Image (cartoon, rainbow, N blue to C red):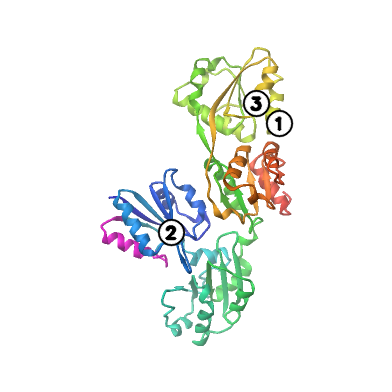
């Protein structure tokens, strides 16, 4: 018998997921997910995890609740560790209680991982505190939608002094407002509707109880939305921190490997961007190709690295072979700050650093020290540009280019990329893989930024209008985007 985890992952911002939820996701063999979750959450599961979409939205159920319950039971009984991902918290109008009760009735072990509810998080990101001393000493959360209509004692709700929040109530906004006013709530009561809370597409409409419906209609607000009523709404004027970030409202697609995307993502999050993470490539370790050279590693005069991947895989190979790095007599060279830093973290200060982030620049540095007959090792990607090797051979060096990793194109299926404002690419391979999966049209009339000239050339081959970072790093890409948005850094 397997086990089922009911996992709350928060309203949208993927960083609102808890450490426990992340840990549990990595254990799952099978994961079921809803429509409203940030799809980046799915990048945290294992590569061999099976994913099943069971989204539900008003008027359209991809899976009924009973079908979802049956699937959870079936996979658990087949021995799988099952994850059921839910936006917000599983027990806050998420029908997690129904799923948990069904598992109990079937004798299946389950665990519920709490999540941050949009009732609190969406207000926070909208600049509205759900409570405030002496102004709102309680809050009350209601569902704004039920199968049989809202059967509330509106007279009681209208007299509540705390903050009132309705979730999933946009379609019933007029009904909610009418009932509250008819039962005595002041029609001048402050009110807000927060659409797509905690995302860069967040929109907040402010009004009074009597005019909020008209304002929401005029601004064409769409679900998902949170309705909040109370004096705390007035604090938005002072506490609206999220929407003041420089890249708020911008959706940016990044195409790096899963391992390399994290830092890029975090920097964009800090600037308020919504990030779509498309892992267009994977790195396959082929360090075993060094086996035929291990006995002569101490004979090389230079070891040159063109990427962080090369450094990491090379030294991982040495560790696995229990090779003492002190036996190496070579001088080290590299392209890029990150590659240099990766060497320094291993106690090696490279003699040669390319001034520009291209092989041509590294060659210019090497040839100052190169003598005919020098042995040069280049551990790098399979099918990489041959410029460095060819140029060193012309100088009389003995060059050993060893493919210690291979770039594998990944099949992708992110339907949420089409409304992205920016697409970023960090290598020709990310371009090729992306175009293979999505085609060229998705990039037409979009803002596209390449990390450097080589990647830019690859995009131009497909007829894409592209900007290039002035500094060939992820920071350079971010600086370029900020400049394109009118910020000068």
Judge from the rendering whether residue 168 lies leftward or rightward of residue 234; answer left or right: left
Q: Tell which circle, 1 or 2, labels the residue nearer the N-terminal end.
A: 2
First reached walking from the N terminus: tag 3 or tag 2: 2
User: Label 1: which residue?
Assistant: 355
Which stretch did the figure color magenta? Answer: 91-109
For disc 2, the neighbor class at 10 Å (few under 14, some 14 to 19, many from 20) is: some
Q: Secondary structure at mark 3?
A: loop
- Name the foreground residue: 109 vs 70: 70
Rendered view: 188 above or below 463? below
Q: Residues within 10 Å of mark 3 (few under 14, many from 20)?
A: few
Q: Judge left or right: residue 438 versus residue 36.
A: right
Classify residue 211 by image quadrant.
bottom right
Reading the image, the residue beneath label 3 is 386
Q: Is residue 105 visible?
A: yes
Q: Position of residue 482 (x, y in %)?
A: 69, 51
Q: Which residue is mark 2?
A: 54
Residue at image point 52% right, 30% down: 313
Element on which disc 1 rests: loop
Q: Are marks 3 and 2 in contact (CB under 8 Å)?
A: no
Residue 101 located within the stretch drawn in magenta? yes
Q: Say above or below: 305 vs 72.
A: above
Q: Disc 1 or 3, which lies upstream in sequence?
A: 1
- Residue 131 place in picture, x, y as percent: 50, 70
Query: Which residue is painted at 51% across and 72% down in the image?
Result: 133
Please identify, in this view, whether the residue under mark 1 or under mark 2 is nearer the observer: 2
Is 271 drawn above or below residue 238 in the view shown?
above
CB within 8 Å, label 1 to label 2: no
Q: CA distance from mark 1 to mark 2?
A: 51 Å
Please state which of residues 208 and 196 is positioned toward the viewer in this rendering: 196
């Amino acid at each position: 018998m397997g086990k089922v985890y009911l996992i709350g992952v928060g309203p949208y911002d993927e960083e609102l997921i808890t450490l426990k939820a992340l840990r549990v996701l990595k254990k799952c063999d099978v994961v079921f997910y809803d429509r409203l979750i940030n799809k980046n959450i799915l990048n945290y599961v294992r590569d061999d995890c099976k994913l099943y979409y069971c989204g539900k939205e008003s008027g359209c159920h991809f899976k009924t609740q009973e079908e979802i319950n049956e699937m959870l039971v079936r996979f658990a009984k087949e021995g799988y560790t099952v994850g059921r991902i839910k936006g917000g918290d599983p027990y806050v109008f998420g029908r997690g209680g129904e799923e948990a009760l069904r598992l109990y009735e079937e004798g299946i072990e389950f665990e519920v991982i709490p999540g941050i509810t949009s009732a609190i998080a969406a207000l926070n990101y909208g600049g509205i505190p759900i409570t405030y001393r002496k102004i709102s000493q309680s809050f009350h959360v209601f569902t704004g939608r039920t199968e049989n209509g809202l059967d509330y004692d509106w007279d009681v709700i209208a007299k509540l002094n705390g903050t009132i929040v309705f979730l999933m109530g946009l379609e019933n906004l007029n009904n909610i407002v009418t009932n509250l006013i008819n039962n005595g709530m002041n029609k001048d009561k402050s009110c807000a509707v927060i659409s797509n809370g905690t995302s860069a597409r967040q929109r907040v409409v402010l009004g009074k109880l009597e005019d909020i419906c008209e304002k929401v209609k005029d601004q064409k607000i769409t679900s998902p939305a949170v309705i909040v009523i109370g004096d705390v709404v007035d604090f938005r004027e002072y506490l609206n921190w999220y929407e003041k970030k420089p890249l708020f409202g911008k959706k940016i697609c990044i195409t790096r490997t899963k391992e390399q995307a994290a830092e890029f993502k975090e920097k964009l999050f800090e600037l308020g961007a919504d990030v779509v993470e498309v892992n267009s490539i994977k790195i396959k370790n082929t360090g075993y190709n060094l086996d035929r050279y291990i006995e002569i590693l101490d004979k090389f005069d230079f070891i040159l690295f063109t990427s962080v991947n090369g450094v990491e895989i090379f030294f991982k190979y040495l560790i696995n072979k229990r090779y003492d790095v002190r036996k190496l007599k070579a001088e080290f060279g590299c392209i890029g700050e990150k590659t240099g830093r990766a060497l320094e973290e291993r106690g090696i200060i490279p003699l040669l650093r390319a001034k520009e982030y291209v092989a041509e620049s590294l060659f210019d540095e090497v040839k100052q020290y190169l003598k005919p007959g020098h042995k040069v090792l280049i551990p790098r990607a399979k099918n990489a540009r041959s410029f460095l090797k060819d140029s060193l051979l012309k100088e009389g060096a003995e060059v050993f280019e060893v493919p210690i990793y291979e770039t594998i194109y990944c099949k992708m299926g992110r339907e949420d990329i089409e409304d992205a404002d920016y697409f970023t690419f960090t290598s020709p391979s990310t371009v090729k893989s992306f175009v293979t999966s999505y085609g060229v049209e998705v990039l037409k009339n979009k803002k596209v930024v390449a990390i450097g000239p080589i990647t830019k050339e690859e995009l131009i081959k497909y007829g894409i209008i592209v900007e290039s970072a002035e500094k060939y790093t992820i920071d350079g890409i971010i600086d370029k985007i900020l400049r394109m948005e009118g910020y000068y850094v």
